[in-house]
Every structure is written in C-alpha cells, then in structure tokens.
Image (tube, rainbow, N blue to C red):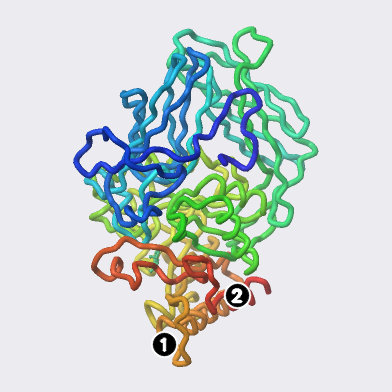
Amino acid sequence: MIRLFQTNDIRKVEELEGMWEFATMESGHAIPAAYPRRLPVPGCWENHPLYKTYRGAAAYRRRIQVKNGATNLRFTFKGVSHTARVIWDGVQVASHYNAYTAFSAIVREVPAGEHELIVVADNSFHEHSSLHQPNDYYSYGGITRPVVMEEVPDVFLERLQFTPRRVEGEWVADVQAFVTNNGEATSRAKVHCELDGVYFELEMGSVGGGQSTVLHGSAKIPGARPWSVSTPNLYALKARLFLDDAVLPTDDLIERVGFRSLTTERGKIQLNGEDIILKGFNRHEDHPMAGCALPLALMVHDLDLMEDMGANTVRTSHYPNDERFLDLCDERGILVWEENHARGFSIEQMRHPKFVEQCEDVNREMVEQHANHPSIIVWGILNECASDCEEGRVHYIRQLDQIRSMDPSRPLTFASHHRDREMCFDLVDIVSFNLYPGWYGDEDPGELVDQARGWAETGGGAGKPIIMSEFGGDGYYGYRDASRVRGTEERQADIIEANLAAYSARSYLSGMLIWQFSDCRVTEGTGWLLSRAGTQNSKGIVDRYRRPKLAYDVVKSYFRR
Ligand code: ADA
C-alpha cells in the first residue's frame, strides 16, 4: 500500500511490491550476475536469517513488462536504506542518499517489451555518509518503503503544496502546483483544483522543455471544518493539469489536506487558537520482525497502543517517517513533531565534508514530501548536536532558515541537552529539552525542569513555549525485582512516574514526550553508546515486540488524566 487514499484518477499508478531478486555485493561494486534469493519489497534484509547483521551493498532486481511502447515511466522510491543507485536496462538513472526520504527516476519513451530494474542499496557507514553513522538506533539495509511506478506524460504534476489560512473567520486554501516538463517543446500549463466542492484555477504559466515551474492560486473554502485532535477533518484536494488549448486534462494529482492554524503565543502552542499540551512519545521505526520497514498493521498497532495510553503526540525521532504513518496520524488526530535526520553529532562530526549538503537535501525532501500533512505541527532539526558553540550555531541558523523559507506556517524547534551552555534557543519558536533526571543523573525532575526554565529565559528562549522532549530510563522487559534496582521494570516505572508527576504539575510546560515508545535495536559497537545491553535501547514503555512493561499503566494514569 502506497498511501491511505487514492492519489490519482487519471495517471496510472502501480506499486511494485512483492518478491524481488536479491544478491549481496560483498566484492566491490560490480552488479551481480546471479541473484540467489528473493526478498520482499518493502522490507529489510536483516529479516532474512543469512543477513541479520549484513552491512554493505546489495542488489534488488525486478523485470518490468511494458505493454504500450513510448511511455514515460516514473519510479518513486519512498525509502531505500540508505545509499541507493537505480539502474534501468543497464544504465544508471538515479542515485540518492538517506533512508528516510523519497526520490524518483524517470525513464522516457520506453519501448514495449521486457525491461530490467535494479536497485543497489548500501547500508555501510562509508566515507561519504555523514548522517547514517553508528548510532543509538539501527541503519537497516534494503528497499524499506514502497516503490511506485507511474506512467507520466512529458509535462506532469510533480507535487502540490497546500497551506491553510484563516482570513476574517473563513478558511482559505493556498495552493502551489509544481509542474515539470521533461519534453522538448514549451507548453502552457493550467491547473484546475477542486476542494470541498469549490472549483478554482491556479494562475497559468508556461513551462519550457527540461524546466519546472510553480503555479500559485488561492480560494476561500466556506464549508471547511477545521482539523483538530478530536475532529481530524480531512479533504481531498484534486488538481488536474491542462496543456495549451486542450479540453481534457492530461495529468492529475490528489492530496489529502486539513485546515488548521498553528501559533506560539504567550509561551504556549495554539492549534486553531486554543492552547495545547503535547503528551506522547518519541518513536523509532523499528520492530524485530520488520526492521524499519513496518507494515501498515504494525504502524496501526503502535498508534493503538499510544492512544490507549492517552497520548496525543508522536515525535519522529530522529528522521522523517513513512508517509503511511503520517497518513494514519492525519486520520486519527495525532499531533506530529517531524524532524530531520541527525542524532547527537559533535562539532567534529558536523565538519564532515558532506554534512551541509546531506542535511540540506533531507530538509528539502522532508518539507516537500510531507508539508501537506495536517498532523505535522512542528518541524525539528539536529537532535542533540553542537548547538553549544558558534560553529555549530551557524548550521542551526542555515537549516532553520532553509525550512522557514519553504514552509513559514509551522513552528520550528530542536531538542537540546546542553542545559545552560545552549546557544540557539533564540533561533526557534519552541524550546525543547532532553533531560534524563533519575537515569543519567539523580536530580529531582521538578527541580531540574524549573532550572531548565531558567536556562531558557537567560539563553534566548524567554517567553517561548517549553517542551520536555525526552526523558526516561531503561527497563529490561521481564526483569522484575523487588529491589527496584536500575534496569528493573519497577525502577523504570518509578522514573517515569516521578517525571510525569513533575511535568504534569507545571502549567508553564507545553509538552512531555517520553523516551521512548518501544525499545529499539542500536548499532553494535563499543563505548557506552554502542555497547548497550542486548544491542538495544531499552527505554521503551513497550519492548521491541510491543509487550507492555510496568511503566505502561503509569503512563496511562497520567496521560489519560
Ligand atoms: C538522547 C537521544 C536519544 C537516545 C537517548 C538515550 O537524548 O536523543 O536518541 O539516545 O538519549 O537513550 O540516551
């Protein structure tokens, strides 16, 4: 399944799911001559008994039958982990870095007959990889999210960006349509939109051969009902593309959107003008049976458990998530903090020659690909990176400016662990703290968060909403002991209780996000971070199989209050 709604009426769309041929490429970069196995797509190769810890390159192959010749085929890979090359009939047609954002390849005027599509995925920590590093989560290997094949004309609708606006008590839809021309001749492009029974046209524009253009338009949508946590109203935004004097549309795109406003005023976050408190979890895309390639049923199960505990928010730590998960959040009224891909980088790591470019790419792709999800209420960047020095600050400024220029409608934040040394609170709309009282230190959570409020005030964050973006402690599933020593489920429950009691009692806080929803696999290695017991981060409120620990009921008693 690609999305939770139909994306096209006109364009032909097919998901290339199923069994693809598979071969590892231990010896260099040569495309394999033989494919000894078949593996599911989407999927991670770590699910196969032979490749549980394989780190390197591998090729996936699939034959494509084309019935009608001279078609343009567009392949969209929603996620390949983590460095990808796409080879069509022996010719490389695309490459991409980063597991957590989508990319496309177009092959033009494909003749009828059988063709070969090969995707090389590489999850090694190679020298050009600045963001996928050995870390406190796992960089899996494979074609981990859906692959889509579409038949597109030379001039087609690349994407839509929708922004809701409230003007004099009425909702207004601002729409941008990105039109791409892969042909040679210039075309005049017109886009007609339909939204909740309102028909409107975007301004017309011409688009030269090999060029792209953006068409803008706005319309009042008088009957629109707002999207909120309790009433997550969604609408189909249907766009049709007409070229030159043609009477019939040649291409189309459907997005699913919601009307809501976001503000940060008086030290609080407002959704549709009302203060909200974010209560929820940090979540990794990780499951022992699926790796990072969670099927829909497991995504639903995660949200069912979160809702059962009374959560209203999920933070996609530490990368953009699968669109189907975001679609589910849209449908269920779950608020999302989505963030770019970077966890815990020191200034030395941020000096990697590819860091700037690879961050810019993931920021751009995240906003372009996910801006239409009403559930996303915050964009985050650079979790626990070097925001405590001038050199690091330059990266924060650049990346926040980049995101703001693409989407000024959402508040921005980053999660900081630098306490009174933090230097970037002035740059964002929301101040977020990762603090682990009771786990990495024995501070009292109430006293610590009051102190943190002071660091926000003096560190450039005065008057801004404050979120406790991470707190928690390890609890090994099934390790129960009356001693309540560190690592027992009892101790974890005590830590969670003390933290939630302190934060729930402080009305100046705008949110509390537990680290973390479920235990997750981490990279195996040495040093304190990579030598975690069981090669997993065990701070989940449920274990990797989603079995609840003792802290589950504690969370429920606070979040449901
Ligand atoms: C950090 C980090 C998380 C995780 C956590 C922990 O704050 O953001 O990714 O590593 O700590 O468990 O220590």
Residue positioned most to the bottom:
483
Say if residue 129 shows up in the picture: yes
The image quadrant in which ligand 1 is located: bottom left
Image quadrant where one finds the N terminus: top right
Left or right of 194, for residue 464: left
Work out whether residue 248 or residue 121 is closer to the camera in this orientation and state it.
121
What mark, if any, has residue 504 been given in the picture?
2
Image position of 159 with respect to 225: above or below: above
Work out whether residue 120 or residue 211 is closer to the camera in this orientation and state it.
120
The picture places residue 531, in percent across and down from the top left corner, at 29, 69
The picture places residue 505, in percent across and down from the top left corner, at 60, 77
Query: Disc 1 and disc 2: Cα gap in Å?
Result: 25 Å
Quarter of the image where one finds residue 81: top left
Residue type highlighted by circle 2:
Ser
Label 1 or label 2, whichever lies nearer to me, is 1
Residue found at x 58% / y 54%: 297
Residue positioned most to the right:
223
Q: Secondary structure at mark 1?
A: loop
Q: Earlier in the sequence, mark 1 or mark 2?
A: 1
Distance from mark 1 CB to nearest ligand 1 atom below 8 Å: no
The picture places residue 84, in percent across and down from the top left corner, at 34, 38
Q: Secondary structure at mark 2?
A: helix
The picture places residue 150, in percent across and down from the top left corner, at 52, 26
Q: Residues within 10 Å of mark 2 (few under 14, many from 20)?
A: some
Image quadrant where one finds the C terminus: bottom right
Residue type highlighted by circle 1:
Val
On the image, numbered disc 1 is attached to which residue? Answer: 485
Say if residue 426 shows up in the picture: no
Image position of 496 with respect to 138: above or below: below
Image position of 554 with respect to 198: above or below: below
What mark, if any, has residue 305 been given in the picture?
none
